[in-house]
Structure formats: structure tokens, C-alpha cells
Image (tube, rainbow, N blue to C red):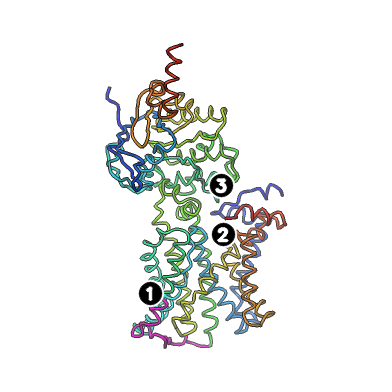
């Protein structure tokens, strides 16, 4: 069965001076899936999201959202079109309450054009509840702890009524229990029909939540496929852990 | 009572303004506004007081305008005097050269200031932090020089002389009320904007411009609007000032001190608050008057004023409104906490 494509990059490239942070990446994201994007530190994962979402100008290549060429669009237009993201380093609006933070997404995002601020403030109540922050609705963002700031990032992105959601390391810095509930949250968001791309270092979360994984290394595609398959790929293990470890790993596997 | 204190202060709404301590303060503030409204008819309203209050109210209006770009949007605009100057020259030249009466001339001056803000805002609002601040200072200074040297158009160092307000015996009252209406209009405008998407976009940009952009806010448009509206306030103030003084001179209306006064009033009262700049303008004038009175020697008062401003910036970076409104209790701990929270 032919699956519907929601986002496609063609030869997406980003150079910082002489450094190729992202080099000719062809990625296809299918509607309704949860795609994992992994790679060692500095592999270009966040840069890749930045050039898709218009945070950084793309050096060359094309980005298509639902067949429409959105290459070079400003970030706010891409946000309004139906792509939302969270930031690895959380970016709350500290002078606002949790409710106001989330309402900004509902005001300006994909579904925002028709909403007044008052309607947006009312509209976000169920989203705040959904991410489990109902008690903190009236708190200022600068009073929140990191796990809640990560949830706030998620709530802000969700309030934009996105069709495609980029989650940039929403689980980094969380403990095991928090990761469990964050994973549950990601699944529930996906069940609402939102396509998700997760960037994550927590492998348990990648295996537990994604249906497909895309690996970047030195800005280039290294592998893609089913999570278990990709994580057992020698090239991927080598990229993460180095050659020596790979040799030992496969010796042990043979022995076992 | 403790609940009252924990209640969130929504930056945009007037919810709870008539409740608790907030309510008392807001009522006092309203009474003060009313008092200012009837002031010229009071028996002790001498020309001196009218004059002083007109100056304070013009400063309040400009400070309210500065608050749009500096306080809410978070861009350190150090050149707002440029808009004051354009407003003054625009109004003056329209009256002299086009023979217009005051109000249409004032409109031309204000629109000219806004258009100028939009034209320079588009390129320079891409700059951030110090770079933006420097660009605004440079533009204001350059404009002052142009106004001073373009003799054929602006009258140069001779300045331009405007006709007197007619009837002249009502002149004091007329300009007082112009300044009063402008300041009150500025307060209403602030409140109006904060309850609209524009207000949310300004605060979002101040707190995190990248996040604001990604969330669908056209940040360029929002910033330019904030800049243009702050220009509108300063431009109107400039036009009123020009007709009031019946004289426009570059070195007078492009004084960099005016920008500093706007910023100081906002900082003293509390940037990013509705009433802060208005109250701050009064605090500033009282401060400077007391200092000049008690320290008439040389520039000593300026030194002390500087020291006071540094203390305010260090201990109450969000302005005195924080304590006046009861949002925070004035104590050594609160002051120390402020240092920790806002240190750069």
C-alpha cells in the first residue's frame, strides 16, 4: 500500500562556513507515523530540524510539506502551516503563566487565525490537562522545574494544532519514571493523528515509541529502518561507540 | 490574604484590579488621574504647576510609548528622541510652510514619526541587544545633525518659530490637557493592545524570539508595530511640545537626554507594566527636583541621580511597581533575591 507522505526533504544541506552540518539528506516522513531521528552528538539532528522549520536558512536542497515546496519559508509561516516543534533547550515565555504560554500557540499556530486571545486561553485548558499540568495552569513559567518545562514545550507545540510535530530531546534529563510517562504522552499524541519525528538519545524511548528510525552521522544518512534492526546495524553501533566496541560486541554475540 | 498574594498577575488583563491591595492602589491611581483631570480648575493651579505637570505628562506619554518597544518587546531602543524631534519638526513645518492649523499639522508630524519608525525599523529591528541600541542612538544623533544643518528646510540653527496658541490666556490649560489626554490615551492604548494578539506577541518576543517565531508569530511585523506605536506616542508629544514652546530647534528637540528620561521613567516605575511608565515619570520628576533643590552645586545632583538609578536597577530590576503593587514584599531578602534572579 502506498503511504501518504507528509514531509519530504531532497538533498537537504546546511553548511556553516566550511562545516557540512547536514549533507544531502533525503528524508521522507509518512503521515501518521512516529519516526525516530538518532545519531551521535553533533551529527546534525537539531540543525536538520532547524532547516526544515525555517529557524536556519537552508544552504541547498528542497523541503516539501504535503507536496508543497516550503524551502526558504520563514519560520512563522511554517508554524502556521501545521508544523510545530519543541526545543532541546527549553524556550518558555518566562514572564507568562503556563496558560498564557500555551495560549500563544493556540493564538498564532495552525488553528490560530480564527481565535481571539480569550478563546485561545479557554481553548488550551484541555491541552494543559492532557500534558498533566492542570494544577500549574496559573503558575509563571519561571517557577517550573525542568520536567514540567519540557511538558510545557510540548503543550505549546500541541496548542498550535500541528499536523507534524518535531520533538527535540523532550526526554533528556528526565528520570526513568518521567521517561515512561513522556513516552506514554508521545503515543497518545500520535493516536490523535499527529505525525511525530522524535530526536532522542534515550534508546529505550526510541525502541519503545517509534515505528521507524533514521540515523544521521556527520550530517549524512547512515541508516534507516525498523528500530531494532537499525540499532543492531554495525555501522550505527560503530558511529556511536567506536570500532573497538563493535568488534567486541559481535565477538560476544557469536560466542553467545 | 495569602491567597491574594499568590494569585497570578496576568500581564494583559485587568482581572482583580479592584480586589485587595491591588484594588486599593488602583483606586488611588484612578483618583489621581481624576485629580489631574480637574487640576487646572483648582484654585492653587498656578502657571508654574501647570507648566511642570505638562512636562511630566509629556514625559509619561513618551515613556508609555517607549515601554511598547523597550518594556514589552524587550528591544533596548535608545533613540526614541528621534521620533519626538520628527513630531516637533513635522508639526512645526506643516504649520509654517503649509499654513495648516495645529491639529492637522500634529497628525502629519505623528504620521511622519511612525513612517520613519517603520522604515528604519525594518532593517534595524533585525539587530539584537547592544547592536540595536547603538543603531538607534546613531540614527537619532544623525537626524539631529541633519535637522541642524539642512538650513533651507528646517531653518537650521535659527530654528523655526510657530504662531502662538490663540486665545493666549488659555494656552497653559490647552497644552496641559493635550499632554493629559495623550498620557491617558497611551495608558488605554497599552491596555487595549495587551488584550490583543499583538500584546501576547510582544511579550513572547521579549521572552524568546525564536520560540515566538516558530509558534507562528510574525515577529518582524510585531516588532515594527511596537516601534511604530512608540514613535506615534513620541511624535505626538513632540508636536504638542513644539506648539507649546512655539519654537523648534534641533539641539532642543533631538536631545539624547529625552530618550534617557523616557527610559528612566519606565525603569523607575517598572518596564513592561501598564502603569509603570506613567508613575515612573512622576517619580523621576520628584527625584530630580529634590536633588536639584538640595544639591544646587554643579552637576552633583546628576551624580546622585545616577547612583539612585544604579541602586534601583540592581535591587528592583522590575521597577518600584513590584513593591508598590504588593507583588513582592519590600525586604532585604526580596532585594537580594532580585539580584540573584536578574543578574546578567
Q: Which residue is mark 1?
A: B108
Of labels 1 and 2, earlier in sequence is 1
User: What secondary structure is marked by label 2?
Assistant: loop
What residue lies at 46% left-to-right and 24% top-to-bottom?
Answer: A208
Q: Which residue is mark 2?
A: B273
Q: Position of residue B19 (x, y in %)?
A: 66, 54
Q: Which residue is mark 3?
A: A97
The quarter of the displayed image where residue B344 is located: bottom right
Viewer-side label of 1, 3: 3
Separation of residues labelled 1 and 2 (CA atoms): 29 Å
Q: Position of residue B55 (x, y in %)?
A: 55, 77
- Residue neighbourhood size for the residue with mark 1, other residues' Cα within 10 Å, grouped as few (<14), some (14–19), many (≥20): many
Contact, mark 1 vs mark 2 (Cβ under 8 Å): no
The segment highlighted magenta reads: B143-168
Contact, mark 3 vs mark 2 (Cβ under 8 Å): no
Residue situated in front as seen by the camera: B16 or B56: B56
Q: Position of residue B173 (x, y in %)?
A: 55, 81
Residue situated in front as seen by the camera: B294 or B96: B294
Separation of residues labelled 3 and 2 (CA atoms): 15 Å
Residue situated in front as seen by the camera: B136 or A30: B136
Q: Is residue B305 left or right of B133 when viewed as pictured? A: right
Give the numbered dot on residue A131.
Answer: none
The verdict on residue B145 being magenta is: yes
Viewer-side label of 1, 2: 2
The quarter of the displayed image where residue A20 is located: top left
Are the residues under badges 3 and 2 in a single subunit? no
Amino acid at each position: 500500500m502506498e503511504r501518504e507522505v507528509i514531509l519530504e526533504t531532497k538533498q537537504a544541506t546546511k553548511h556553516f562556513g566550511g562545516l557540512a552540518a547536514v549533507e544531502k539528506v533525503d528524508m521522507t516522513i509518512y503521515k501518521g507515523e512516529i519516526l525516530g531521528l538518532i545519531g551521535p552528538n553533533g551529527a546534525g539532528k537539531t540543525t536538520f530540524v532547524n532547516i526544515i522549520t525555517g529557524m536556519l536558512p537552508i544552504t541547498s536542497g528542497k523541503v516539501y510539506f504535503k507536496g508543497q515546496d516550503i524551502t526558504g519559508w520563514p519560520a512563522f509561516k511554517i508554524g502556521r502551516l501545521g508544523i510545530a516543534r519543541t526545543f532541546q533547550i527549553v524556550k518558555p515565555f518566562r514572564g507568562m503563566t503556563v496558560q498564557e504560554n500555551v495560549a500563544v500557540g493556540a493564538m498564532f499556530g495552525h488553528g490560530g487565525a480564527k481565535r481571539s486571545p480569550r478563546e485561545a486561553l479557554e481553548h488550551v485548558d484541555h491541552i494543559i490537562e492532557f500534558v498533566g499540568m492542570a494544577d500549574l495552569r496559573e503558575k509563571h513559567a519561571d517557577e517550573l522545574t525542568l520536567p514540567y518545562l519540557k511538558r510545557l514545550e510540548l503543550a505549546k507545540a500541541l496548542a498550535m494544532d500541528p499536523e507534524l510535530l518535531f520533538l527535540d530531546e523532550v526526554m533528556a534529563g528526565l528520570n526513568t519514571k518521567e521517561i515512561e510517562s513522556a513516552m506514554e504522552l508521545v503515543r497518545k499524541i500520535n493516536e490523535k493523528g499527529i505525525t511525530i519525528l522524535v530526536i532522542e538519545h534515550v534508546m529505550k524511548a526510541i525502541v519503545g515509541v517509534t515505528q521507524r528510525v533514521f540515523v544521521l552521522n556527520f550530517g549524512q544518512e547512515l541508516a534507516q529502518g525498523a528500530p531494532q534492526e537499525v540499532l543492531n546495524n554495525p555501522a550505527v553501533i560503530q558511529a556511536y561507540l567506536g570500532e573497538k566496541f563493535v568488534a567486541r560486541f559481535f565477538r560476544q554475540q557469536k560466542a553467545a | 490574604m495569602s491567597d491574594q498574594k499568590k494569585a497570578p498577575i496576568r500581564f494583559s488583563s485587568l482581572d482583580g484590579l479592584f480586589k485587595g491591595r491591588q484594588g486599593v492602589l488602583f483606586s488611588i491611581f484612578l483618583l489621581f488621574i481624576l485629580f489631574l483631570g480637574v487640576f487646572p480648575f483648582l484654585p492653587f493651579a498656578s502657571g508654574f504647576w501647570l507648566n511642570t505637570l505638562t512636562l511630566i505628562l509629556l514625559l509619561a506619554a513618551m515613556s508609555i510609548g517607549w515601554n511598547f518597544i523597550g518594556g514589552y518587546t524587550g528591544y533596548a531602543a535608545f533613540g526614541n528622541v528621534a521620533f519626538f524631534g520628527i513630531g516637533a519638526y513635522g508639526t512645526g513645518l506643516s504649520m509654517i510652510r503649509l499654513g495648516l492649523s495645529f491639529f492637522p499639522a500634529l497628525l502629519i508630524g505623528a504620521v511622519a514619526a511612525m513612517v520613519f519608525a517603520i522604515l528604519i525599523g525594518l532593517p534595524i529591528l533585525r539587530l539584537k541587544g547592544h547592536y540595536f541600541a547603538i543603531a538607534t542612538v546613531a540614527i537619532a544623533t544623525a537626524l539631529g545633525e541633519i535637522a541642524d544643518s539642512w538650513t533651507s528646510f528646517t531653518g537650521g540653527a535659527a530654528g523655526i518659530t510657530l504662531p502662538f496658541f490663540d486665545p493666549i490666556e488659555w494656552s497653559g490649560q490647552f497644552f496641559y490637557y493635550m499632554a493629559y489626554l495623550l498620557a491617558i490615551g497611551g495608558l488605554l492604548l497599552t491596555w487595549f493592545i495587551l488584550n490583543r494578539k499583538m500584546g501576547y506577541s510582544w511579550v513572547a518576543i521579549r521572552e524568546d524570539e525564536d520560540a515566538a517565531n516558530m509558534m507562528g508569530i510574525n515577529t518582524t511585523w510585531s516588532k515594527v508595530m511596537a516601534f511604530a506605536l512608540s514613535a506615534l506616542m513620541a511624535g505626538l508629544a513632540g508636536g504638542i511640545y513644539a506648539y507649546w514652546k512655539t519654537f523648534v530647534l534641533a539641539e532642543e528637540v533631538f536631545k539624547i537626554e529625552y530618550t534617557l528620561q523616557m527610559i528612566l521613567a519606565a525603569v523607575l516605575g517598572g518596564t513592561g507594566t501598564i502603569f509603570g511608565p506613567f508613575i515612573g515619570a512622576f517619580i523621576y520628576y520628584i527625584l530630580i527636583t529634590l536633588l536639584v533643590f538640595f544639591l544646587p552645586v554643579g552637576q552633583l545632583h546628576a551624580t546622585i541621580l545616577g547612583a539612585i538609578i544604579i541602586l534601583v536597577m540592581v535591587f528592583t530590576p522590575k521597577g518600584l511597581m513590584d513593591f508598590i503593587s504588593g507583588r513582592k514584599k519590600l525586604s532585604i531578602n526580596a532585594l537580594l533575591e532580585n539580584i540573584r534572579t536578574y543578574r546578567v
